[in-house]
Image (cartoon, rainbow, N blue to C red):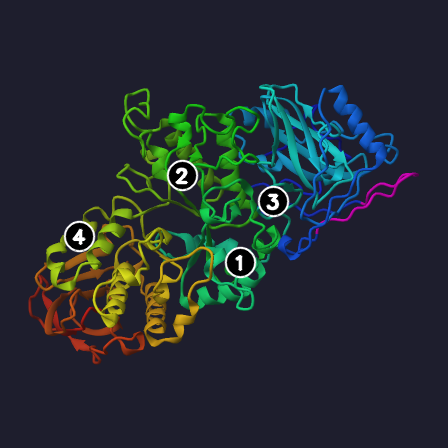
Amino acid sequence: MAKLTSKTQPAKTDIPLEQESSFPQSQPVKTKKPSLAKSKTLQPKAATFPDSVPIKATKGKVKAAQPETSITAIVANLAVKKGRKVPVAKTNDLPVIHESNTAEEIPATLNAVEVYSRFTDFDIDLFKGGKHFKLYEKLGSHVVTHKNVVGTYFAVWAPNARYISVIGNFNGWNNGSHALNHRWDGSGIWEGFIPHIGNGEVYKYFINSNSGEDLQKADPFALRWEEPPQTASIVADTYYDWNDADWMANRHQHNALDKPYSVYELHLGSWARSKESPDEFLTYDQLADTLVPYIKDMGFTHVEFMPIMEHPYYPSWGYQLTGYFAATSRYGTPQQLMHLIERFHQEGIGVILDWVPSHFPGDAHSLYRFDGTHLYEHEDVRKGYHPDWTSYIFNYGRNEVKAFLISNALFWLDRYHADGLRVDGVASMLYLDYSRKHGEWETNIYGGNQNLEAVAFLKEFNMAVYSNFPDVQTIAEESTSFHGVSRPVYTGGLGFGMKWMMGWMHDTINYFQQDPINRKYHHNELTFSLIYAFTENFMLPFSHDEVVYGKGSMLSKMPGDEWQKYANLRLLYSYMFTHPGAKLLFMGSEFGQTSEWAFDKSLDWWVTQFNCHSGMQQAVKALNHLYRNEPALYEKGFDSSGFEWIDGGNANDSILVYARKGHDAANDVVVVLNMTPVVRYNFRIGVTAAGEWKEIFNSDARQYWGSGVNNPLPLNSEARSWHGKANSINITVPPLGAVMFKRG
């Protein structure tokens, strides 16, 4: 997009340290940072918070620098003039990085807050119209030079405020010393340049609302926040010298719908902890050295992080966000997270981020009633309050809110090189009566229950994502029968790339929880999914939601004695990896963790010393590599021509036989699933073509802690009609086992 000039644009001598980036380029242009200007009375300190050290590394509490008497007097005078009380200076857990200037130290040519703007008239028009999708380059805090002095430009949207100032360590948290300027154009934006502060400065906005309320709010566009429970924003940048050009140039081949897509979902804070200090998180850098090689070895094609945006309440798992543009400081700096993502890319693994546009918490420092009014959330509680999560719902009909959310989505794809966004809570967005009783919701203008504003927003979000980043995927967590979730907007769909297949997940778990002797009465629960499997681009999820809140682990859901539990789980995963659609498995499930997931501690890695768990782990690894190496299992994963029932009706024996097909018939794979602990000898099945068929996978193999019942030799087909096929083979089917064949 060409830059437009206007009277509000900075002079040519003003050089932002972090330049704008244009899609699809993904990092700001690095420019040389000019030195701070010197004056006769002051040589300002230009110290910045080190980007390479996590905030948590600083243990001791350091008091903020106290303001000089002269500046205190000035602040007091300003506050008195405005009829305000002078607040007491606060302390903060972060190290002091800047000492306050005295009135005499500020150069005569610069005010405490200079008139300055990064907005053009065109920017403002786009913002008002809800079409500005790069707001992170404008709003928030940005280190720039102005009149040859380094400082920070602040801009915040608060149309119902009558006074806003920046408060922080640099001014002793005084409300009256650094007031922002209210733009004249009706945009509701307040802005200004404050000299001699830079990266690492801790700050908030003091807002006096038109309602008379005094509020202290963190910056909605801040690129970094303090580590909770601290709640202030931090001036930061997202510059990173990326080294993943090969991945970015070719990732369309990894993210395409006709390529293998196997996702490892995880929560960064509980995947693993330090053995020496189990209460401490691993940093992004430590995860780069441990998590990346593990996922590569296991064969997953993608990793999905549960929300890594800043959130105040750790037990929310990250699903109640406050810092939408900030990677959580619990694990390190923005650049350290970028390094982790880069390492995944260098190993050929895509990174999906959980994204939460459905709701946000009501913390005092957050988006809730940001300027004393319902600015981001819908004012009507029937649309603006989420009863299940005691949180607040965005006003999707407000242009500026749409621009905020879509800018946020593109920000993670742009600055962090994310390869996809899994969108949380889509069903709750689509329906006005979601989790509401009669009388607690209001119909739309047509008398229906669809939230038309949310529907329009999701369509616009997907169009913006795919028009700017055509080689990524958006994935909807949507649990209803809403039509066309993963269909293009131009055909009437919502435009997502994929949708979680929640019905399949519930039916499958319900079936496998049955004792094998009763499974013949539930046979249709497994076959039903193929009736609608190709109505959407489905992802098959066994996610974190299935192993919390007393549901137990995946292993504990399985019936039978210890051996049967593991055999059943290997069989279930074999079914998932051979069923049409992409795959998703939550951490710990791959090695059969016995206890359900606990967010406040590490996974039980110690159990992998036992053969039953290590065997499960090896089975999942083998399934991943089989899925990646057999085109029939992924080339037509969303196409009905890629699946064929050979025998889907054998309820009495609880056996399923089907073929998976790709572009080349020579790659056909025939799958046999035995849902009972009975070995089936001399079991005849039809095959898709004549020839020699070889067993390529057996979930009952001894290395997986199985019983070792197998088909060791290639099997020559016979010209004997069976299951409607002209050719057939005679096989042995292992107990509670999955066996797969391919022509050799």
Q: Which residue is mark 3?
A: 230
Disc 2 to disc 4, how far (Cα)? 31 Å
Q: CA distance from mark 3 to mark 4?
A: 49 Å
Using a 10 Å C-alpha cutoff, classify the residue at mark 2 as few (fewer than 14 neighbours), some (14 to 19) or many (20 or more). few
151 on left or right of 649: right
* Amino acid tagged 2: Trp
Q: Give me the disc on residue 389.
A: 2
* First-in-chain label (1 vs 3): 3
- Kindly indicate whether the residue at mark 2 contacts the one at mark 1 (C-beta within 8 angstroms): no
Q: In the rendered image of this protein, does residue 18 appear above or below residue 276?
A: above
Residue at x 27%, y 52% (from the top left corner): 505
Q: Residue furthest right?
A: 40
Q: Estimate the spatial distance between the alpha carbons at disc 1 and disc 3, rounded to whole Å.
A: 39 Å
* Lower position in the chain sequence, tag 4 or tag 1: 1
Frontmost residue, 114 versus 252: 114
Within 10 Å of disc 1 (Cα), the crowding (few <14, some 14-19, many 20+) is few
**In the rendered structure, are the residues bearing label 3 and label 4 in contact, judged by CB atoms less than 8 Å apart?**
no
**Dot 2: element:** loop
Counting residues from the N terminus, which is met first, the one under dot 1 or under dot 2?
1
Which amino acid is tagged 1?
Asp
Span of residues in magenta? 35-49
Image coordinates for residue 412, horizontal then vertical, percent: 52, 45
Q: Tags 2 and 3 in contact by the CB under 8 Å rule?
A: no
